[in-house]
Image: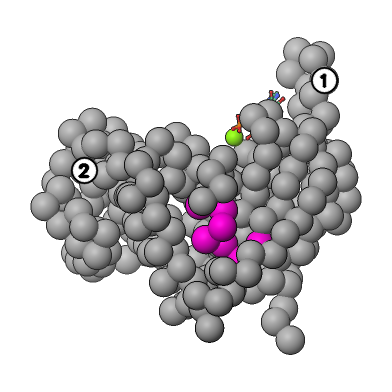
Amino acid sequence: MTKNIVVLKNVHKIYDPDGVRVHALRGIDLEVKEGEMLAIMGPSGCGKSTLLNLLGGIDSPTQGNIVINGIDITTLSDGEKTTFRRDNIGYIFQLFNLLDFLTAIENVALPLLLQGYTMSAAMEEAKMLLRQLGLGDRIYHYPNQLSGGQAQRVAVARALMTHPAIILGDEPTGDLDTTTSLDIMSLFRRINRQNKQTLIIVTHSRTIAEKCDRIVHIEDGKIVREESVQSAKEEIA
Ligand SMILES: Nc1ncnc2c1ncn2[C@@H]1O[C@H](COP(=O)(O)OP(=O)(O)OP(=O)(O)O)[C@@H](O)[C@H]1O
Ligand SMILES: [Mg+2]
């Protein structure tokens, strides 16, 4: 039986900046299997990014437990969370979050440098991955010299660089045209199959969501519906 790599139990998140209380997640129960591709959908403001930030250990729940790869991350200190994130999670943010003062290849190599790779080894790996993503002739460009789709692919490369067990993508294909979006989804599916990596992505696009194995619908901080995607399963077979 495939193990659950992610288990959420009764997760709540309440934001309270300056006394304005927002109950962003209201009791999320969710299990994700190792090697699954999961899409999260729902209207703007329903709590999707909040959920992803909790999964990535970037923020903490107000209540509930989040167990990832057998570790309850809600019990970790900030330092332990940083290490946990570095070793287990690849994150593609809603806004690409590339570092403006680094070139494409430097942005992609950075996670490996943080893991202790030498500069030349990290740059070599980064170059290979960028080539695979069709960016071989853009590796020395800075983010502001790239198109939106190219910058997004650099962000994808950076998240994949350390072969994390879990890849979290907040609108990883947002703002891209359909062809480029589907290319990125094919890449996700390929690495998902090759390495059994688990992918959890937020998307507004039904077409993109249907490339995953399962779709979870969130409304107003709660999971309201789930569907398994038949065509995705057939493609795997
Ligand atoms: N740091 C924060 N402080 C206070 N409130 C927040 C914070 N982050 C999010 N919220 C609120 O929590 C709710 C959920 O926000 P979230 O960003 O998770 O939505 P979302 O589903 O990702 O929306 P979108 O599709 O527009 O990206 C919103 O009402 C938002 O205003
Ligand atoms: Mg969001």
Check if mark 1's residue and mark 2's residue have beta carbons within 8 Å: no
Q: Which residue is mark 1?
A: 21
The amino acid on which the numbered mark 1 sits, given as a three-letter code, is Arg
Q: Which residue is mark 2?
A: 103
Rendered residue at 23%/31% (across/down): 144
Q: Position of residue 32 (x, y in %)?
A: 70, 65
Ligand 2 rendered quadrant: top right
Q: Secondary structure at mark 1?
A: loop
Position of the N terminus, as image quadrant, is bottom right
Q: Secondary structure at mark 2?
A: loop
| Circle 2 Cα neighbour tier, 10 Å, few/some/many (<14 / 14–19 / ≥20) | many
State left or right for residue 163 relative to residue 89.
Answer: left
Camera-nearest residue between 180 and 69: 180
The numbered mark, 1 or 2, whose residue comes first in the sequence reads 1
Decide: is 124 above or below 59: below
| Circle 1 Cα neighbour tier, 10 Å, few/some/many (<14 / 14–19 / ≥20) | few
Decide: is 26 above or below 185: above
State left or right for residue 167 relative to residue 130.
Answer: right
Count all numbered tags in the image, as a single digit: 2
Q: Is residue 27 magenta?
A: no
The amino acid on which the numbered mark 2 sits, given as a three-letter code, is Thr
Q: Check the image and name the residue furthest to the bottom.
A: 1
- In the image, the segment drawn in magenta is 208-214
